[in-house]
Image (spheres, rainbow, N blue to C red):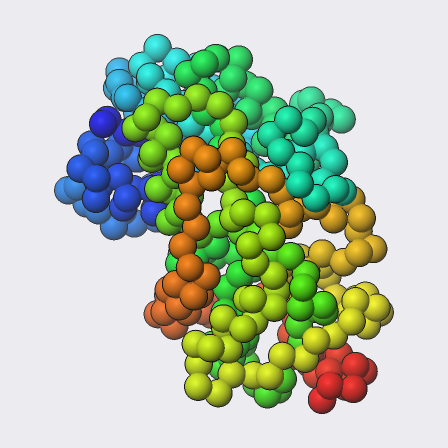
C-alpha cells in the first residue's frame, strides 16, 4: 500500500510509520522538517507546512498519488481542508485522526458515535486550546465534505505510551517507577480517590495498528478509538505501577475536596483526574468504543504499556518535562493536610 502520513516523526505518527514499514508498505511522510527522521532511506520524507499560507505550504505533495492518507496533525479546519482538497483526486481513502473531545456533551457515561458534536461559536476562530473539540469536529466535517464515503474518522481518547511528550500518563509512570525524575519526592504519592475511578486511554501502538487495519481494509465510518469502557480504573493503574518496581512509593488516596482546596489543576496538575465538580466531563473516561472493538481495535496489557513507557522515560532527556504537573512542595503540603504524611 502507498501510504501518506501527514505528520510522522513525533508520537502517533512515529508509531504509524514503524507499523507500516513492518507491514512492508511504501511510506511517505509530510512534516515541517523540525524533527529528525528516524527512517532515512526507508521512507520518502517531504517537507512543507500544513498551512498553505506559510511557504512552501503543500507544494511538496503536488503530483503524488496514494492508496491512503492518515492525517494525524490536523487541528484547524481551514488547514485540514487545504490538504484534503489537494489530495482528493489522488488519495483513495483519507483517515482523519480526530478526538473524543469532539462531543458537545460528555456529562453521561456510555456515549457513542451518534452523540452530537460541538459547534464552534465563532466559525472563523483558529484558537486551538479553548476550542480544541469543536475545531476537531469542524475538521471532520471538512474531510467528510470533500471525501464523502472515502473518509474515515478515528476519535481516540487519551493516547499514551512511548514518545508521549505530554507528561500526562508519563507523570504517573515516573512518580511510581522513576520518582527520581520528578525531584526529591516523599515515599508516599498523592493519588486522587477513589480507586474505582474509571480510566480510559489507548496505547499509541494499538491505535496505529487499528488505523492501518482500517486503511488496508478501505473501511469507512467513524470510530471512538479507546480502551473498552470499564476496562481500567485508577486503582488498576496504581497496582500495575507498584508491581513494576521493587520499592514503589505508597499510594496516598486523597479525597477530592482536599485536592480542590489545594487548587490542584484537574487533568494537568494531577493528570487523568477530573473532579466531580466538573460534571460536564463525567463521561469522558467512560465512552462507548464498542464499534471500534467490533472493527478490530485491540488493547494490549496495561503492564506492557506502563513498562515500555517507563523504559522510554528513563532513556529520554527529561530536563524540559514536568513543568505543569504537581510539584514536590505542593505534594508534601497535600500529604500533610490529608493526614497521609
* Quarter occupied by the N terminus: top left
| Residue that protrudes farthest toward the front in the picture | 294
The image shows residue 126, relative to residue 257, as above or below, that is above
Q: Nearer the viewer, residue 120 or 198?
A: 198
| Residue that protrudes farthest toward the top in the picture | 89
State left or right for residue 201 relative to residue 28: right
Taking the image as drawn, is residue 205 in sight?
yes
Identify the residue shown where x is 35% and y is 42%: 209
Taking the image as drawn, is residue 6 in sight?
no
Q: Quadrant of residue 44?
A: top left
Identify the residue shown where x is 52% and y is 27%: 222
Identify the residue shown where x is 72% and y is 69%: 193
State left or right for residue 224 relative to residue 111: left
The image shows residue 294, relative to residue 326, as above or below, that is above
User: How many labels were placed on the picture?
Assistant: 0
Q: Nearer the viewer, residue 15 or 79?
A: 15
Residue 100 percent location from the top left of the image: 60, 39
The image shows residue 163, relative to residue 25, as above or below, that is below
| Residue that protrudes farthest toward the left in the picture | 41
Residue 15 percent location from the top left of the image: 34, 47
Residue 227 percent location from the top left of the image: 52, 48
* Quarter occupied by the C terminus: bottom right
Q: Quadrant of residue 208?
A: top left
Identify the residue shown where x is 83% and y is 55%: 277
State left or right for residue 173 relative to residue 218: right
Residue 182 percent location from the top left of the image: 54, 76
Amino acid at each position: 500500500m502507498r501510504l501518506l502520513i501527514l505528520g510522522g516523526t513525533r508520537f502517533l505518527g512515529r508509531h504509524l510509520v514503524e507499523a507500516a514499514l513492518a507491514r512492508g508498505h511504501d511510506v511517505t511522510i509530510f512534516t515541517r522538517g523540525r524533527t529528525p527522521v528516524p527512517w532515512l532511506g526507508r521512507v520518502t520524507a517531504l517537507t512543507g507546512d500544513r498551512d498553505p499560507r506559510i511557504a512552501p505550504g503543500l507544494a511538496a505533495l503536488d503530483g503524488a498519488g496514494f492508496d491512503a492518507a492518515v492525517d494525524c496533525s490536523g487541528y484547524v479546519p481551514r488547514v485540514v481542508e487545504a490538504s484534503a482538497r489537494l489530495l482528493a483526486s489522488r488519495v483513495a481513502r483519507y483517515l482523519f485522526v480526530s478526538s473524543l473531545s469532539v462531543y458537545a456533551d460528555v456529562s453521561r457515561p456510555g456515549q457513542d458515535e451518534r452523540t452530537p458534536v460541538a459547534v464552534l461559536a465563532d466559525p472563523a476562530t483558529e484558537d486551538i486550546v479553548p476550542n480544541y473539540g469543536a475545531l476537531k469536529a469542524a475538521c471532520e466535517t471538512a474531510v467528510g465534505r470533500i471525501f464523502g464515503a472515502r473518509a474515515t474518522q478515528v476519535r481516540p481518547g487519551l493516547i499514551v505510551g512511548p514518545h508521549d511528550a505530554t507528561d500526562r500518563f508519563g507523570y504517573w509512570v515516573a512518580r511510581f517507577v522513576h520518582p527520581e525524575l520528578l525531584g526529591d519526592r516523599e515515599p508516599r504519592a498523592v493519588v486522587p480517590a477513589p480507586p474505582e475511578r474509571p480510566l480510559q486511554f489507548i496505547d499509541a501502538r494499538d491505535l496505529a495498528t487499528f488505523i492501518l487495519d482500517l486503511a488496508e481494509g478501505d473501511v469507512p465510518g467513524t470510530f471512538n478509538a479507546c480502551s473498552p469502557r470499564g476496562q481500567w480504573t485508577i486503582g488498576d493503574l496504581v497496582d500495575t505501577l507498584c508491581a513494576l518496581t521493587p520499592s514503589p512509593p505508597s499510594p496516598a488516596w486523597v479525597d477530592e475536596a482536599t485536592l480542590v482546596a489545594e487548587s490542584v489543576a484537574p487533568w494537568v496538575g494531577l493528570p487523568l483526574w477530573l473532579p466531580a465538580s466538573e460534571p460536564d466531563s463525567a463521561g469522558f473516561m467512560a465512552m462507548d468504543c464498542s464499534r471500534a472493538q467490533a472493527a478490530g481495535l485491540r488493547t494490549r496489557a496495561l503492564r506492557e504499556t506502563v513498562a515500555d513507557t517507563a523504559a522510554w522515560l528513563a532513556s529520554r532527556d527529561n530536563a524540559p518535562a514536568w513543568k505543569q504537573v504537581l510539584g514536590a512542595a505542593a505534594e508534601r503540603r497535600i500529604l500533610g493536610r490529608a493526614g497521609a504524611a
